[in-house]
Amino acid sequence: MDPRIRILDRPRRDRLGEGPIWVPERGLLFWVDIEAPALNWLDLARGETGTHPFPEPLGWIIPRAGRRDFIVGLKSGFAIYDLEADRITPIGDPEPDEPDNRLNDAKVDGAGRIWAGSMHQAETAASGSLHRLDPDLTWRRMDTSYGVANGPTFSRDGRILYHSDSAARTVYAFDLAADGTLTGKRAFLRFPEAWGWPDGMTTDSEGCLWIAHWGGGRLSRVDPEGRLMRAIPLPAPNITSCAFAGEGLDRLFVTSAARGAEHVPAAGGLFELDVGVTGLPPRAFGG
């Protein structure tokens, strides 16, 4: 195993670990286990972990600027979550016409808007979409017909939104205008079959993308032109997402899934990598 990879010691593995996000105000890295379902966290200073069950599938958690609560993506839609009170307040369902879908992955852009994908929970229909949740708590469907909408991230200057359809093995790029309009959808990177499927992503301080490979057992770094720069094998086949964390944003944490790989000891673990590059500062939702 690469000596720069550390497997976090935890009492349980994630059935479907996803959505890591660094919240510097709390000193915590949060991530979710969609299928437990549960919210997990790691105190970076103390090395202590915690977990809390959720009543329905939880796709992601994002802090709100200037507040102590969060926005979460649930099977039932967008909601506000108060961690201390353990209270969920629904905002609304962006897909009342797709009762078998759930929200899957999300990120915040430079204007404080959440971009969230959805997917058919049984993964048997291309009914997923890309939604934008604005700071006034209204939403809009921005793109559709995804098999598994996944991994939003942005270019360093914020003018490009990257978004995947994992089922199509394709990472797309869109031009992102200041008003939140998307234009110019194009294939940014197509995964060969040997790579598995593109999952969650993040962007580093040099503008390169780090992409998790579901079924590929690795994390890849690609440049803004989509050229492979580096591939890091990991000791689990289903790698799901990644995020930079820590005061220097120099600790890269990677989530994985035990689902379909129960025989692999490290599957479903949280990994920490030293990759020699830093990430971009995390963003909070503006509403």
Image (cartoon, rainbow, N blue to C red):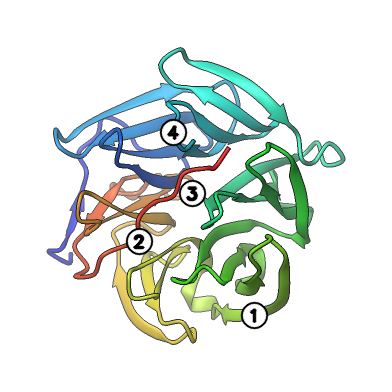
Q: Nearer the viewer, residue 87 or 64?
A: 64
Q: CA distance from mark 4 to mark 1?
A: 36 Å
Q: Can you give x and y, in whole percent of width and height, for residue 108 in the image? A: 53, 51
- CA distance for labels 3 and 2: 32 Å
Q: Nearer the viewer, residue 182 or 97?
A: 182
Q: Which residue is mark 1?
A: 187
Q: Residue furthest top?
A: 85
Query: What residue did someone put label 2 on?
Result: 280
Q: Residue furthest right?
A: 97
**Mark 3 or 4 closer to N-term?**
4
Q: Name the secondary structure under disc 4.
A: loop
Q: Earlier in the sequence, mark 4 or mark 2?
A: 4
Q: CA distance from mark 1 to mark 2?
A: 24 Å
Which percent across, then down, holds residue 277?
24, 69
Assign a secondary structure to mark 1: strand
- Residue 66: assigned label: 4
The answer to whether the residue labelled 3 contacts the one labelled 2, judged by CB atoms less than 8 Å apart, is: no
The N terminus, quarter of image:
bottom left
Q: Which residue is mark 3?
A: 260
Vertical side of 84 occupied by 217: above or below: below
> Residue 100, percent across and down?
77, 39
Q: Nearer the viewer, residue 280 or 262?
A: 280
Task: Please provide percent x and percent y for residue 61.
Answer: 49, 37
- Could you tell me which residue is drawn at 40 percent across and 46 percent down? 20
Which amino acid type is marked by label 4? Gly
User: Which element type, helix, strand or loop, lies under badge 2?
Assistant: loop
Q: Nearer the viewer, mark 3 or mark 1?
A: 1
